[in-house]
Amino acid sequence: MTTEAELAIAVSGLTKRFGDRTVVDSFDMEVPKGAIYGFLGPNGSGKTTTIRMMCGLLIPDGGSGQCLGYDILTEPQQIKEHVGYMTQRFSLYEDLTIRENLDFMARMYRMKDRRSKVQKALADLGLSDRADQLAGTLSGGWKQRLSLAACLLHDPQLLLLDEPTAGVDPKARRDFWDEIRRLSAAGVTVLVSTHYMDEAIQCDYIAYIAYGKKLISGPAREIPRIIGLTTWRVEGPEISKLEAELRRTEGVDQVARFGAVLHVSGTNAKALDRVAAEQQKRKTHKWQKKDAELEEAFIYLMAGATDNFLTPAVPG
């Protein structure tokens, strides 16, 4: 059991309403220190709102908790001093150079030995050779590095990353995640919202959030097992015809298409195995049992979620 001293964040019953809609509904979470915690969910699901409440950036309408040892309701300012927040959109000044942007942020933090801190940030994020380049002329990947450098200037204990790799190329994404893992290894706790499954698997823990409710949370690689999904990989001719048939077959909870391959899943392993055995007798397609992965788990969870835009707000 994780003790309070080992937790960066522990919240219970977090609730947030905007107008008559409950956008976050009774959210509970524990985040170990130094963990990379991923938040997955559709647009408008409450991921960003939840992260902001957990870290004192937005006051909840209900619930309680602590972040970095401070009360999220009564000590939000103390929390903010130890948090680095990277928004999805580039939010620095495009008409300033990289160095000027970082120097401005250092002034905002009232940092002592400002120039050496800026120089270190430039070196740590590989920005030294571009220090005098205007931020507005940078590519998406370099803007991302600059944003991260600005977040890290004051040596935060906690990083909030809101869709940090949206719109950047695959190499920039890999480089970014190398840096995040380095920070985590150094003891920095990271909360990141993402839509990319290849990024989600790099997180230590994951929470699936849909329409204001947490559907499940736990160690990333254990999520499919926690749900209880069994999955078969199927390939062969006329795959679309087989897909339509399987969607009508008892014992099959989900059929996900990946190119010319089907991933057929269910929570009743025996029933799904019987379906596979019957199909294998036909000898028309190759059926191979596989470990269920995060993407199958995500599709399964979302299929049972209800959009809170279409339903009345939860009272309370």
Image (cartoon, rainbow, N blue to C red):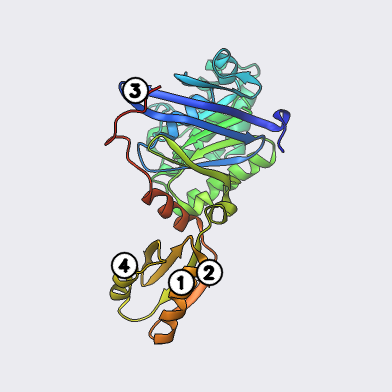
Give the Cα separation between the discs numbered 4 and 3: 40 Å
For marks 1 and 3, give the CA distance: 43 Å
**Which of these two is toward me, 85 or 271?**
271
Point out the tag, 2 or 3, that comes first from the N-terminus: 3
Tell me which amino acid carries mark 1.
Answer: Arg
Kind of residue sitting beneath label 3:
Phe
Badge 3 density bin: few <14, some 14–19, many ≥20, Cα 10 Å: few
Tag of residue 290: 2
- Image coords of residue 235 (percent x, y): 40, 77
Which quarter of the figure has residue 48? top left
- Name the residue at 29% across, 70% down: 244
Label 2 to label 1: alpha-carbon separation: 6 Å
Q: Which mark is residue 233?
A: 1
Residue occupying image coordinates x 40% and y 26%: 93
For the question of whether residue 97 can be seen, the reply is no
Residue 296 to residue 218: above or below: below
Badge 1 density bin: few <14, some 14–19, many ≥20, Cα 10 Å = some
User: At numbered mark 2, what does the secondary structure look like: helix, strand or loop?
Assistant: strand
Q: Which quadrant is the N terminus positioned in? A: top right
Question: From the viewer's perspective, is 240 left or right of 106?
Answer: left
Residue 248 — which label? 4
Q: Can residue 203 be seen at all in this image of the molecule?
A: yes
State the residue in front, 5 or 94. Answer: 5
Instruction: Return the disc, 1 or 3, that comes first in the chain's sequence.
Output: 3
Which residue is depicted at the point 57% across and 39% down?
A: 125
Residue picked out by circle 3: 18
Determine the secondary structure under disc 1.
strand
